[in-house]
C-alpha cells in the first residue's frame, strides 16, 4: 500500500512539474515549430532532473559530483518554470475576471465618455480661437481642466479596483496581502515558489525511496540473534540431509553449505562479495542464492550494492 502511494505521488508530482515547464516554454515561442522543439527540450530537461539526483544518491565518490551539480541546476530551472507558469496563468485569469466585473466596466464607460467629451471641447475651443472668441475659449479651458481632473480621478479608481477571481470572490492572495500589508503579486510569487519547490523535492524523494525499497532490507534485531542462528543451523541440517539422499548433487550442495557457514563465520570479511565466493562449481546462481538465504535469515543485510555481515549472527563452522 505504501509503495503504491509513493508510486502514485511520484507520477503526479513529476507529471505536474513536467507539464508546467513544457506548457510555459511551448507558449513562449513565436511559431509552432519552435514551440514544439522547446516543449520537447523542456520535457527532456525535466526527465533528466528526475533521473540524475536519484542516481547520484545511490553512488559514492567523485562520480556523483557532476550528477548532483547538474541535478541542482535543473531543479532551479524547473522551479523557475513552474513559478512562471503559475504566475502567468494567475495574472491572465485575474485580469480577465477584473475586466469583466461590473465595477470595472462601469468606470471604464465613464472614462470613455469623459475622453469623448474632452475631444469635443478641444474641437469647440479650436473653433472659438479661429473666430477670435477669447471669452468662449477661456470657458472651454476651465471645462477641459475639470474634465481632465475627473478623468485622472476615474483612472485612479479603475486601477484600485479589487482583483477578483473567476467566481467573483476576493482572491486568497489579496486577503493574505491585506492582512500582512504586502503587495498581492509578491505574495503570490512567494507562495508559488514554495509550492514549486515542494513539488520537485517531494517528487525526487519519492523516486529515491522507490529505487531503494527493493535494495535495502533491515537486519534482524539483537534480541532475535539466537533464534535466527538456530533457524539457520536447522535449515542447514535439513538441506544437508536432502543432499545426502541425492548422490548426484552431493558435492555441489555440500560445498554450498560449507560456503554458507564460512560466509556467516566471517571468513570473507564483514562485507563479503559474490565475486570472492564464486569458485569451482559454485557459480553465480548458487552464490546469489546463498546470499539471499543469509539475508532472509538475518545473518547479514544489503545496503545498496554492498552486503554487511552482522557479527552477532556468526554461525560456527563444524
Image (spheres, rainbow, N blue to C red):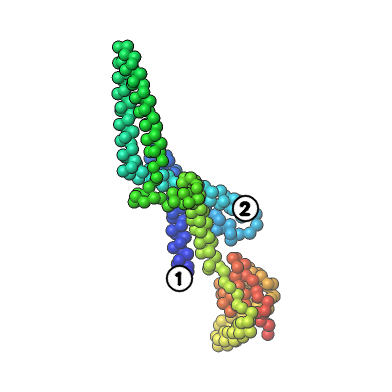
Q: Which residue is mark 2?
A: 65
Element marked by disc 1: loop
Within 10 Å of disc 2 (Cα), the crowding (few <14, some 14-19, many 20+) is: few
Residue situated in front as seen by the camera: 299 or 118: 118
Q: Is residue 260 above or below residue 244?
A: above
Residue 59 falls in image quadrant: bottom right
Residue 163: image tag: none
Residue situated in front as seen by the camera: 253 or 172: 172
Q: Residue at x 47, y 69 (%)?
A: 2
**From mark 1 to mark 2, how far is it between C-alphas?**
34 Å
Q: Residue at x 44, y 46 (%)?
A: 87
Q: Residue at x 30, y 23 (%)?
A: 120
Q: Residue pushed farthest front?
A: 135
Q: Is residue 208 above or below residue 287?
A: above
Element marked by disc 2: helix
Q: Is residue 208 visible?
A: yes
Residue 247 falls in image quadrant: bottom right
What percent of the width, then of the height, locates residue 176? 46, 52
Q: Which residue is mark 1?
A: 1
What percent of the width, then of the height, locates residue 288? 57, 72
Point out the image quarter for the C terminus.
bottom right
Residue situated in front as seen by the camera: 186 or 253: 186
What percent of the width, then of the height, locates residue 277? 64, 72
Q: Earlier in the sequence, mark 1 or mark 2?
A: 1
Point out the image quarter for the N terminus.
bottom left
Q: Is residue 61 above or below residue 155?
A: below
Q: Which of label 1 and label 2 is nearer to you?
A: 1
Residue 133 falls in image quadrant: top left
In the picture provided, is 122 more to the left or to the right than 44?
left
In the picture provided, is 113 more to the left or to the right than 247?
left
Q: Is residue 240 visible?
A: no
What percent of the width, then of the height, locates residue 117? 30, 27
Amino acid at each position: 500500500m505504501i509503495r503504491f502511494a509513493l508510486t502514485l505521488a511520484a507520477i503526479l508530482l513529476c507529471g505536474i512539474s513536467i507539464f508546467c515547464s513544457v506548457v510555459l516554454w511551448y507558449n513562449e515561442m513565436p511559431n509552432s515549430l519552435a514551440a514544439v522543439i522547446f516543449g520537447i527540450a523542456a520535457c527532456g530537461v525535466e526527465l533528466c532532473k528526475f533521473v540524475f539526483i536519484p542516481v547520484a544518491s545511490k553512488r559514492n565518490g567523485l562520480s556523483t559530483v557532476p550528477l548532483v551539480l547538474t541535478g541542482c541546476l535543473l531543479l532551479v530551472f524547473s522551479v523557475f518554470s513552474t513559478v512562471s507558469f503559475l504566475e502567468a496563468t494567475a495574472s491572465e485569469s485575474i485580469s480577465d475576471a477584473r475586466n469583466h466585473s461590473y465595477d470595472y466596466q462601469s468606470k471604464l464607460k465613464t472614462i470613455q465618455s469623459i475622453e469623448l467629451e474632452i475631444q469635443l471641447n478641444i474641437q469647440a475651443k479650436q473653433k472659438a480661437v479661429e473666430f477670435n472668441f477669447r471669452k468662449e475659449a477661456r470657458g472651454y479651458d476651465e471645462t477641459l481642466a475639470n474634465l481632465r481632473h475627473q478623468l485622472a480621478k476615474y483612472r485612479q479608481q479603475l486601477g484600485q479596483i479589487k482583483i477578483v477571481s473567476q467566481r467573483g470572490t476576493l482572491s486568497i492572495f489579496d486577503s493574505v496581502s491585506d492582512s500582512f500589508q504586502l503587495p498581492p503579486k509578491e505574495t503570490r510569487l512567494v507562495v508559488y515558489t514554495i509550492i514549486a519547490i515542494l513539488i520537485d523535492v517531494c517528487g525526487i524523494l519519492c523516486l529515491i525511496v522507490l529505487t531503494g525499497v527493493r535494495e535495502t532490507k533491515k537486519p534482524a534485531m539483537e534480541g532475535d540473534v539466537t533464534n535466527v542462528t538456530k533457524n539457520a543451523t536447522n535449515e542447514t541440517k535439513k538441506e544437508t540431509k536432502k543432499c545426502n539422499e541425492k548422490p548426484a548433487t552431493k558435492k555441489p550442495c555440500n560445498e554450498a553449505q560449507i560456503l554458507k557457514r564460512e560466509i556467516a563465520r566471517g571468513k570473507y570479511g564483514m562485507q563479503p562479495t559474490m565475486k570472492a565466493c564464486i569458485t569451482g562449481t559454485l557459480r553465480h546462481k548458487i552464490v546469489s542464492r546463498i546470499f539471499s538465504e543469509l539475508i532472509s535469515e538475518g545473518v547479514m543485510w544489503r545496503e545498496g550494492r554492498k552486503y554487511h555481515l552482522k557479527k552477532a549472527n556468526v554461525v560456527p563452522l563444524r
